[in-house]
C-alpha cells in the first residue's frame, strides 16, 4: 500500500476507531495497480463464492486489509453486470453496455478469479468443490445472490426457459426490452411481483414506471397490469403512487398473487381466481438464497434465507463460513446492492481480524436506493443503521420530498462511486 501505512488505513476505514462509516468510493485512493508488486507470503486462504456486489467488494477489501491473505473468487460470469439501472434498459433510457464491467480492477488488487461455479461446499473438510478440484479455505465468504422458487407458481417450472424474469441483469434484460418494443399498440403487458422478501424491494415498482413510461410514449393504446402479491407497494409507496399519477396506462392490483401461468394461452390466474390475458409477461418469481447456499444447508428454518452474526456475517449454522448480500436474512436491511457492498466491507474487516486473532470491531451497514420514475427523474430512500447489543437496528429511513431531475443526477454519481468501490 504505497504511501499509506496499514495503521493509517485502519484509521481511515474506521477499523481502528470502531466506526461504521463505509461510503462508497471512500477507499478509491488505494486502488493502485499492485499486480506487479512482489507477493506477500500467504498466511491464510479465503475463497469467495460469487463476484457480484457483495463478493467482489469482500474480495477487494480483504486484499486491501491484509496482503498475506490469498483471495480466490469463484464467479462463472466473465463480466459484472449491474442490476441497479437495468430497469432503465427496458425503456431504452440506458444501455446494458454502460452497466457492464470487467474484473480487471479486482485482479490488480491481487485477487485470483476463476470463472467457474462452486459445485459444493464441504464445511467439515473446509473446502469447496469446483469441477474436479477441491479448493481449501481458512474462511469462506458466500455471496451467491438469489435463485428462484419456480415450483411456487403452477406451470412456471415447465415454461421457465420461455418466460423472462430479467431479475439478474444480462441477456434476459435485453430480451425483455425487445419484447416490450415488439408489443402491439393496444397490447397488455403483465408484470407480477412476488411476496416480500425478494431482491430489491423497490425494483418492481421502478420497473413498472419504466414500462409505463415507455408504453405511454411509444404505444399509447397499450396498458400495463401490475399484479402485486403484496398488500401494498413494498418501498417508497407514497412516492411511487405520486409518480403513477402520470401513468393512467398502469393498472395496479395489490394483493393479487399469481398462482398459475399458462404460457400456451398467454394467461395468468391469481389467488383471487382472476384470469388475465397478456401479450407480454414479466413474471418475477419468488426467491430464496442462491442454490449453493441452499444446498450447503446454510439457510434457516424458513428454508429460504441465511441467518448470520450481525458483527461478522459468519453463518449461525456453519463456523468459518460467512454469508453476505441478498442471501442473508435476520437483519432489518433490504436486499440491495448498496447493502451487499456494505456487508462485503464489514465482512472483509471481520475476516481479516479473525484470521489475525484480533477482536472484530462493530460496524453498521448503510443504504441509499434510487428509483427512476420516468426518463429523467428519480426518487430515493436513505436508511441508516446502528449496532445495538451486536444486532443491526434501523435508526431512520428518509425519502426524498418528491421526484426530481436532481435526484436522478445524484443517482449517476452514486453508481459511478459504488461501482468503483466494488470493482476498481
Ligand atoms: C431490476 C433490479 C434493480 C435493482 N436496483 C438496485 C438499486 O438501484 N440499488 C441497489 O442498491 N440495489 C439494486 N438492486 C439489487 C442488487 O442488484 C442486489 O441486491 C445485489 O446484486 C446483491 O448482491 P449479491 O452479491 O448478494 O448478489 P449478486 O450481485 O447477484 O452476485 C451473486 C453472484 O454470485 C454468482 N454465483 C451464484 N452461484 C454461484 C456459485 N455456485 N459459484 C460461483 N458463483 C456463483 C452469480 O453469478 C453472481 O454473479 C436491483 C436488483 C434488480 C433485479
Image (cartoon, grey):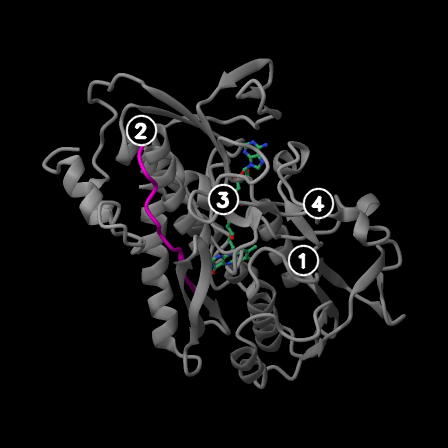
Instruction: Say above or below: 87 vs 45.
Output: below
**Marks 3/2: CA distance?**
21 Å
Badge 2 element? loop
- CB at mark 4 closer than 8 A to ligand 1? no
Which quadrant: the C terminus? Answer: top left
Q: Residues within 10 Å of mark 2 (few under 14, many from 20)?
A: few
Q: Which residue corresponds to the image point at 45% horizontal and 66% vertical from the top-left?
A: 394
**Marks 2/1: CA distance?**
53 Å
Image depth: mark 3 or mark 2 in front: 2
Instruction: Say above or below: 283 vs 247.
Output: above
Image-based side of 109 in relation to 129, left or right = left
Name the residue carrying label 1: 179
Task: Point out the tag, 4 or 2, that comes first from the N-terminus.
Answer: 4
Q: Position of residue 331 (x, y in %)?
A: 52, 56
**Marks 1/3: CA distance?**
34 Å
Q: Which residue corresponds to the image point at 47% horizontal and 71% vertical from the top-left?
A: 375
In the rendered image, residue 34 lying in the magenta stretch gets the answer no
Image-based side of 180 in relation to 190, left or right = left
Name the residue carrying label 2: 356
Number of numbered discs visible in the structure rendering:
4
Instruction: Say above or below: 402 vs 412.
Output: below
Badge 3 element? loop
Q: Residues within 10 Å of mark 3 (few under 14, many from 20)?
A: many
Name the residue carrying label 3: 324
- CB at mark 1 closer than 8 A to ligand 1? no
Task: Point out the tag, 1 or 3, that comes first from the N-terminus.
Answer: 1
Which segment did they paint magenta?
A: 356-368
Amino acid at each position: 500500500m504505497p504511501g499509506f501505512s496499514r495503521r493509517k488505513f485502519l484509521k481511515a476505514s474506521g477499523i481502528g476507531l470502531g466506526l461504521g462509516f463505509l461510503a462508497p468510493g471512500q477507499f478509491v485512493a488505494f486502488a493502485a495497480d499492485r499486480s506487479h508488486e512482489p507477493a506477500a507470503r500467504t498466511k491464510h486462504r479465503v475463497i469467495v463464492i460469487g463476484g457480484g456486489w457483495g463478493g467482489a467488494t469482500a474480495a477487494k477489501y480483504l486484499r486491501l486489509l491484509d496482503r498475506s491473505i490469498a483471495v480466490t473468487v469463484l464467479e462463472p460470469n466473465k463480466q459484472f453486470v449491474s442490476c441497479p439501472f437495468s430497469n432503465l434498459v427496458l425503456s431504452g433510457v440506458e444501455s446494458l453496455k454502460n452497466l457492464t464491467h470487467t474484473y480487471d480492477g479486482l485482479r490488480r488488487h491481487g485477487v485470483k478469479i476463476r470463472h467457474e461455479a462452486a459445485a459444493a461446499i464441504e464445511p467439515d473438510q473446509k473446502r469447496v468443490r469446483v469441477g474436479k478440484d477441491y479448493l481449501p479455505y481458512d474462511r469462506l465468504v458466500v455471496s451467491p445472490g438469489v435463485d428462484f422458487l419456480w415450483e411456487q407458481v403452477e406451470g412456471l417450472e415447465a415454461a421457465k426457459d420461455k418466460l423472462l424474469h430479467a431479475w439478474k441483469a444480462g441477456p434476459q434484460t435485453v430480451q425483455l426490452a425487445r419484447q416490450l418494443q415488439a408489443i402491439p399498440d393496444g397490447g397488455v403487458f403483465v408484470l407480477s411481483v412476488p411476496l416480500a422478501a425478494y431482491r430489491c424491494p423497490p425494483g418492481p415498482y421502478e420497473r413498472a414506471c419504466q414500462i409505463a413510461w415507455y408504453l405511454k410514449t411509444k404505444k399509447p393504446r397499450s396498458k400495463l397490469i401490475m399484479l402485486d402479491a403484496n398488500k401494498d407497494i413494498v418501498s417508497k409507496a407514497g412516492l411511487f403512487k405520486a409518480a403513477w399519477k402520470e401513468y393512467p396506462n398502469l393498472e395496479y392490483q395489490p394483493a393479487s398473487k399469481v398462482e398459475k401461468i399458462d404460457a400456451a394461452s398467454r394467461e395468468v390466474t391469481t389467488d383471487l381466481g382472476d384470469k388475465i390475458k397478456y401479450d407480454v409477461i414479466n413474471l418475477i418469481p419468488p426467491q430464496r438464497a442462491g442454490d449453493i447456499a441452499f444446498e450447503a444447508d446454510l439457510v434457516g428454518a424458513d428454508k429460504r434465507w441465511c441467518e448470520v452474526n450481525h458483527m461478522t456475517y459468519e453463518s449461525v449454522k456453519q463456523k468459518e463460513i460467512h454469508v453476505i448480500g441478498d442471501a442473508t436474512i435476520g437483519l432489518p436491511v433490504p436486499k440491495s446492492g448498496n447493502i451487499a457492498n456494505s456487508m462485503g466491507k464489514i465482512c472483509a474487516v471481520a475476516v481479516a481480524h479473525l484470521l489475525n486473532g484480533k477482536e472484530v470491531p462493530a460496524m453498521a451497514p448503510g443504504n441509499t436506493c434510487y428509483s427512476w420514475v420516468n426518463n429523467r427523474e428519480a426518487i430515493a430512500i436513505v436508511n441508516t443503521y446502528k449496532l445495538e447489543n451486536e444486532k443491526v437496528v434501523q435508526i431512520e429511513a428518509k425519502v426524498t420530498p418528491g421526484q426530481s431531475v436532481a435526484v436522478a443526477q445524484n443517482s449517476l454519481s452514486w453508481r459511478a462511486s459504488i461501482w468503483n468501490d466494488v470493482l476498481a
